[in-house]
Image (tube, coloured by chain):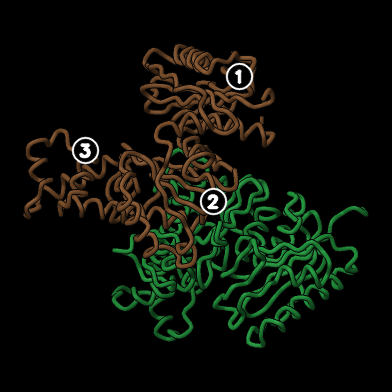
Chain colours: A green, B brown
Amino acid sequence: MASAGHYVGLDVGGTTMKAAVVNDEGLPLSTPVVMATEPERGQDAGLETMCETIRRAVAAAKLTMTEITAIGVATPGLMDIKAGLILDPPNLKPWKNVPVRDHIQKAFGLPTVYQNDANAATYGEYWVGAGREARSMVMFTLGTGVGGGIILDDFIVEGEHSHGGELGHMRIESPAHGRLCGCGSRGCLEAYGSASSVVRRTREELATYRGPSKLKEYYTANDDVLTAKVIFQLASEGDALAMEIVDDTAYYLALGACALIATVDPEMIVFGGGMAVAESFRAKIHEYTTRFGLPHPVKKVKIAFAKLGSDAGFIGTGGAARLALRQGKV
Amino acid sequence: MASAGHYVGLDVGGTTMKAAVVNDEGLPLSTPVVMATEPERGQDAGLETMCETIRRAVAAAKLTMTEITAIGVATPGLMDIKAGLILDPPNLKPWKNVPVRDHIQKAFGLPTVYQNDANAATYGEYWVGAGREARSMVMFTLGTGVGGGIILDDFIVEGEHSHGGELGHMRIESPAHGRLCGCGSRGCLEAYGSASSVVRRTREELATYRGPSKLKEYYTANDDVLTAKVIFQLASEGDALAMEIVDDTAYYLALGACALIATVDPEMIVFGGGMAVAESFRAKIHEYTTRFGLPHPVKKVKIAFAKLGSDAGFIGTGGAARLALRQGKV
């Protein structure tokens, strides 16, 4: 179909950047092109790598630039989404005030849309992933930290200061009782629900745990390589301590879900990242959400796991470009 | 101007309902008409009272029905906003499944828009009150409970299950440590920041407080009429215990503000209700928000008090009707 759209989605991370062209159905036209970000080479080199990644993605899709409808670029915060600026995010040091949107727009002469990477990944899941049928969706991404995004009726909640959907820094415990978060505050969801925090909480438990435990045996032999994946695996094999850690994690994430229910009351809440795999874990999050959330909406809210994996980033970034174009925002 | 719009805003509460016609600038064309709701007389009587209140409001504005552009109706939850239904809210007993929007639409043959009362009041402040200049705004209304609403770029966050902006039931303390809320859960903002909770926390403090205190003297003489207003008044006169209660209240409300900053990151956060008066209280909320919120957006977020008082309800309800019409939703 000659009139069909082609959107480049470029997802820039601290280590690599990935891009692919997606069509109007959210299907990537090739496997993503991956290039090293190497922020230490400076922001001019970074901008050039972005352009090169875009060019290669278009070539990989067997298209020419004239066949591209729009370009989406997503980066990790801090950023000014409206101004199209990367400010000074910790994982892109020493970049500072990089006019990424304008640069790419000028380089290719195409409508270019800039978005936060977590918002873009959430939009990807909303558009063609777990939330495909949902009108509104919140996503929590569980990794080293806890990322997030909120989409309400095709409206991406960017926030007035580009901090919309910073769900890892929503508190689930007051500063008086809360665990210390990497951000310096206490009680943030990230200090409880990230993969790193699962490991950290496990180490703490192991320090005093007296029962028999495969987890303890594993840890004694491999304390330097303890991961959330191992802990979840041992829980699935019935290890009591690992099960307790996983159960606590479900409870903490459910408190996060409950907070979103009381604020934006979405149709669906999605969890993504390496820990969001086992149906039993999903069911536990759902159970705790039902127990601790507002009685009326918790009966109806859907709790699901993400479907697109790390592809959500570039797919959602291309999708965000398409959405902005359709909404007349570019 | 013949083409100017006239919107009836009808704000239905458990005790009274209020209506007035507002124009395109959000100005009421008369003082509001107030009628008793008397839910105990049944829902058919209630619907008739609503229609009568609307008729009287139009008459009070010296207009005829043919000069009305649209009608807005707001009620307290539980409700189904999309379906235009009052479900079974506790303060409108014994009403159940009342098709309020369709009834009023048929009665007058005019576009009719249904909204949650707290969302409508928030929209009122956003449209022509404290948030007039803001692109996005969250409001907390402090009364017997804590109500709330979220408006993002002219989008009223209704929620998928009509529970958007139930900010009183967002937790600021985990269930493990939290105060019991009227809803049966623990840790809800409402259990800390409502006027009733201010009184309850004061009574608890007084039980063990040993210092000299005007508040203690007042309470000993008037324990049955202790109100948040008195407590705030005594704080402004320098009573140490009252000041501590007010300070704690500012801290709790700031934690609520911080949660909204990490989720929707609004341009402005507004507090309304009888306690939201003194500039020193506003400044304290702002100070705690700066201390406990996300570093980047807290530097820019505006913290303000509501300006329209109880008029926000009917003004915002009329405004919500106008907004829906302009957005092509009715």
* Crowding at mark 1 (Cα within 10 Å: few <14, some 14-19, many 20+): some
Residue bearing mark 1: B105
For the point 59% across and 57% down, the residue is A158
- In the rendered image, residue B21, in percent from the top left (x then y), is placed at 53, 23
Instruction: Give the residue type at disc 3.
Output: Thr
Question: Can you tell which quarter of the image residue A317 is in?
Answer: bottom right
Q: Secondary structure at mark 1?
A: helix
Q: Secondary structure at mark 2?
A: strand
- Give the left or right position of residue A317, taking residue B314 as reference: right
Q: Which of the labelled discs sits on residue B159, or is there none?
A: none
Name which of mark 3 and mark 1 comes first in the sequence: 1
* Crowding at mark 3 (Cα within 10 Å: few <14, some 14-19, many 20+): some
Q: Are marks 3 and 2 in contact (CB under 8 Å)?
A: no
Residue bearing mark 2: A303
Work out whether residue A272 can be spotted. yes
Instruction: Give the residue type at disc 1.
Output: Gln
Task: Say which of marks 3 and 1 sits in front.
Answer: 3
Image quadrant in which the N terminus of chain B is located: top right
For the point 30% across and 43% down, the residue is B275
